[in-house]
Image (cartoon, helix red, strand yellow):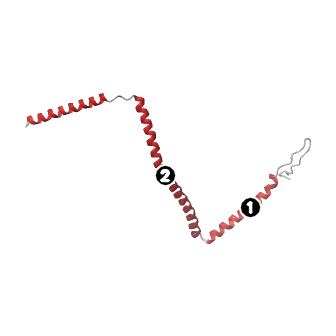
Amino acid sequence: MNELVEIVSILASINRINTTMQDNETTENTPEKRHFDSVREAVRSGREEARQMAREAAPKLKSTVADVVHEIAYGAAFGAFFAGAFAKELVPKQIKEGLQKGAAAGRNAARKACDSVKDVLTPTPVAEPGEVIEIGIEPAGA
């Protein structure tokens, strides 16, 4: 039995040596490529592969971007109008009326402030050399 294992081991070693010799003969018979040839081929094949993958991916990417934009717009519109409608139904009538009256009073106060400042904001006339311009501002104590 021990002899059988030894014979199998020897045959396996011979087979490995035979395979190694065949590999060496194959590499000796093939012409060597120059390094820049393989680099040129690698760049060319990489460019072609990238171009093909881009052609395949472009429609999918376009569709995905369109879906994302749609979902964002939908979510923003839903959120804004849901919050407004919910607040409208939730807020009591007295608070709504108070908000409306307060907004109207604020608008009126802003108009009055603009009217009172409008005179101050009008451009002052330009004086000719030697001419006196009256500004029309009264001292605070007068």
- What amino acid type should be assigned to the residue bearing mark 2? Pro
Q: Which quarter of the picture shows residue 109?
A: bottom right
Q: Quadrant of the N terminus?
A: top left
| In the rendered image, the vertical position of residue 16 relative to residue 128, given as above or below | above
Q: Is 44 displayed left or right of 72 in the figure? A: left
In space, the residues marked 1 and 2 are separated at their CA atoms by 57 Å
Image disc number at residue 60: none
Q: How busy is the neighbourhood of tag 2: few (under 14 within 10 Å), some, or many (20 plus)?
A: few
Q: State the residue position of label 2.
A: 59
Q: Which quarter of the picture shows residue 12?
A: top left
| In the rendered image, the vertical position of residue 123 relative to residue 36, given as above or below | below
Give 5 or 137, whichever is nearer the viewer. 5
- What amino acid type should be assigned to the residue bearing mark 1? Ala
Under circle 2, the secondary element is helix
Identity of the residue drawn at 72% across and 62% down: 107
| Residue 115 % position (x, y) | 79, 58
Which tag is nearer the camera, tag 1 or tag 2?
2
Q: Earlier in the sequence, mark 1 or mark 2?
A: 2
Q: Is 36 displayed left or right of 99 in the figure? A: left
| Residue 13 % position (x, y) | 18, 32
Q: Is 77 displayed left or right of 4 in the figure? A: right
Q: State the residue position of label 1.
A: 109
| Residue 129 % position (x, y) | 90, 41
Give 96 or 46, whichever is nearer the viewer. 46
